[in-house]
Image (tube, helix red, strand yellow):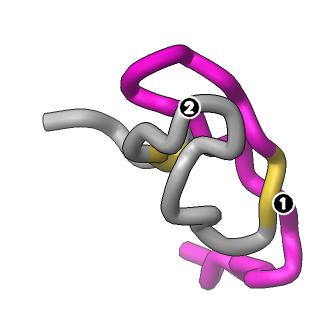
Amino acid sequence: MRDVDQKSAEESPYECFDCGHVVLAENNPGQCPDCGGEIRNRHTPLE
């Protein structure tokens, strides 16, 4: 197995739970720029 090289400088899609707005960012923006709702990284599975 090879080690996975995760680059922290890559942009990831973050989606708002409330309005569905998608933001591309290197780090979690914290709040949706449109409605102020909670944002999640779309590459992280929901449990």
Residue extent of the magenta highlight:
1-23
User: How far across and down, in percent of the image, does residue 32 sit?
Assistant: 59, 43
Residue at screen point 86% across, 80% down: 9
In the picture of the structure, the residue carrying the numbered disc 2 is 35
Q: Amino acid at mark 2?
A: Cys
Q: Nearer the viewer, mark 2 or mark 1?
A: 2
Identified at 70% across, 78% down, the residue is: 6
Residue 3 in the figure: left or right of residue 41: right
Residue 46: give x, y in percent of width and height.
25, 35
Locate the C terminus by quadrant: top left
Specify the farthest residue to the front.
35
Residue that numbered label 1 is attached to: 11
The tag earlier along the polypeptide, 2 or 1, is 1
To which quarter of the image does residue 5 belong? bottom right
Foreground pick, 2 / 32:
32
Q: Nearer the viewer, residue 2 or 30?
A: 30
Q: Is residue 4 magenta?
A: yes
Q: Amino acid at mark 1?
A: Glu
Q: Label 2 neighbourhood size at 10 Å, few (<14), some (14-19), many (20+)?
A: few
In which image quadrant can residue 13 be found?
top right
Quadrant (top left, top right, bottom left, bottom right) of the N terminus: bottom right
Q: Determine whether 30 is above or below 16 in the image.
A: below
